[in-house]
Image: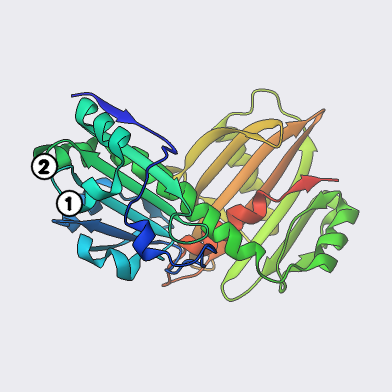
């Protein structure tokens, strides 16, 4: 079976005409992690088993929250910011959604994936998975699962980012960080601790829940390995964060290019034995000229969901710039 992925394909939604009554696209609804799933025969187990991300923060958390409904609910939920529609060309709502070219592509390739933006609301992501026959639906979801996850993961990040930037940005704190050669976009409530600024260690922190971000500069290390990066972080947090250290079995390391600077990103879990505490962290290690720069964010929110706060920390880290 050949399955073809089509990104940003221009599908003509014939049902849009009856659903949108004005030219201005309204604001979307739904929580950042919620995805509305619409199908003639919705199968929540099939969706959860193949289109989900589990994060260890350190407790396991499913990133997406799915609401699986019959396709007849499309009018009631069309303003949700994330919608996944799936079925075969034999399903009336799928047949109505696709124009002739999209339907022809689906028949030729057995299954096709389409993604669209701002169909019924602003900042909306709509993903449509269509198959030529019902028998291929389950197979197609399994084959396309990772692609669909990636689409909705990126959309989730952008949704959280937009929400964050719509908040009140503390320009004063951001300006104060400039004296240490760094820039971060921070909301109200973050405080700067420059106690160890003479040791090139500066951090900002806030509460409810507890979050902190530190910045550190040191001489550049050639061929920095993930293990050495973790050891460096452990040295810093044991000294400045009262004994925090990394749980090495729960780390994920990626090479990154951060604003033109090459480095590595570590996502993992920190722990503090004396405080009986722990939680997720994100670290960026990158170099410029003869210096190695480290920017690190951590979260402590015991007993509560962490995904949104964790993603906000990533949004803040991605606002970082050297001055």
In this rendering, the answer to whether 153 lies above or below 231 is below
In this rendering, the answer to whether 171 lies above or below 92 is below
In this rendering, the answer to whether 288 lies above or below 168 is above
Which residue is labeled 2 in the image?
A: 134
Tell whether 239 sits left or right of 26: right
Tell whether 304 sits left or right of 272: left
Between the C-alphas of marks 1 and 2, the distance is: 12 Å
Q: Would you identify the image quadrant in which residue 265 lies? A: top right
Do the residues bearing badges 1 and 2 touch, measured as CB atoms within 8 Å? no
Q: Residues within 10 Å of mark 1 (few under 14, many from 20)?
A: few
Report x, y in % for residue 282. Answer: 57, 49
The residue depicted at 35 percent of the width and 50 percent of the height is 13
Which residue is labeled 1 in the image?
A: 92
Q: N-terminal of the two: label 1 or label 2?
A: 1
Q: Residues within 10 Å of mark 2 (few under 14, many from 20)?
A: some
Quarter of the image with the N terminus is top left
Q: Residue lying farthest right?
A: 179
Q: Secondary structure at mark 2?
A: helix
* Disc number placed over residue 181 in the picture, else none: none
The residue depicted at 70 percent of the width and 51 percent of the height is 319
Q: Would you identify the image quadrant in which residue 178 lies? A: bottom right
Residue sitting nearer the eye, 135 or 63: 135
The residue depicted at 65 percent of the width and 67 percent of the height is 166
Report x, y in % for residue 158. Answer: 54, 53
In this rendering, the answer to whether 227 lies above or below 203 is above
Q: Secondary structure at mark 1?
A: helix
Report x, y in % for residue 271. Answer: 50, 58
Q: Residue lying farthest left?
A: 135
Residue sitting nearer the eye, 99 or 223: 99
Residue sitting nearer the eye, 93 or 201: 93
């Amino acid at each position: 079976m050949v399955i073809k992925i089509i990104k940003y394909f221009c599908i003509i939604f014939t049902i849009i005409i009856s659903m949108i009554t004005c030219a201005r696209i309204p604001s979307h609804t739904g929580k950042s992690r919620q995805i509305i799933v619409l199908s003639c025969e919705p199968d929540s187990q099939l969706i959860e088993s193949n289109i989900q991300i589990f994060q260890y923060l350190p407790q396991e958390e499913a990133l997406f929250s799915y609401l699986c409904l019959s396709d007849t609910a499309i009018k009631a939920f069309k303003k949700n910011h994330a919608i996944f529609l799936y079925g075969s060309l034999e399903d009336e709502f799928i047949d109505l959604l696709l124009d002739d070219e999209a339907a022809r592509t689906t028949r030729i390739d057995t299954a096709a994936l389409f993604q669209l933006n701002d169909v019924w609301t602003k900042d909306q992501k709509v993903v449509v998975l269509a198959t030529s026959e019902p028998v291929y639906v389950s197979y197609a979801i399994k084959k396309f699962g990772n692609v669909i996850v990636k689409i909705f993961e990126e959309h989730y990040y952008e949704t959280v980012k937009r929400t964050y930037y719509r908040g009140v940005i503390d320009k004063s704190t951001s300006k104060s960080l400039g004296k240490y050669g760094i820039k971060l976009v921070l909301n109200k409530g973050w405080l700067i601790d420059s106690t160890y600024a003479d040791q090139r260690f500066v951090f900002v922190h806030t509460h409810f829940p507890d979050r902190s971000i530190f910045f550190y500069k040191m001489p550049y290390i050639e061929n920095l390995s993930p293990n050495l990066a973790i050891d460096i972080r452990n040295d810093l947090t044991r000294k400045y964060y009262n004994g925090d250290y990394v749980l090495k079995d729960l780390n994920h390391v990626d090479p990154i290019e951060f604003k033109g600077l090459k480095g590595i990103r570590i996502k993992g879990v920190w722990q503090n034995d004396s405080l009986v505490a722990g939680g997720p962290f994100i670290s960026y290690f990158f170099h410029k000229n003869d210096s190695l720069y480290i920017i690190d964010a951590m979260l402590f929110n015991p007993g509560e969901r962490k995904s949104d706060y964790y993603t906000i920390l990533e949004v803040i880290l991605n606002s970082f710039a050297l001055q």
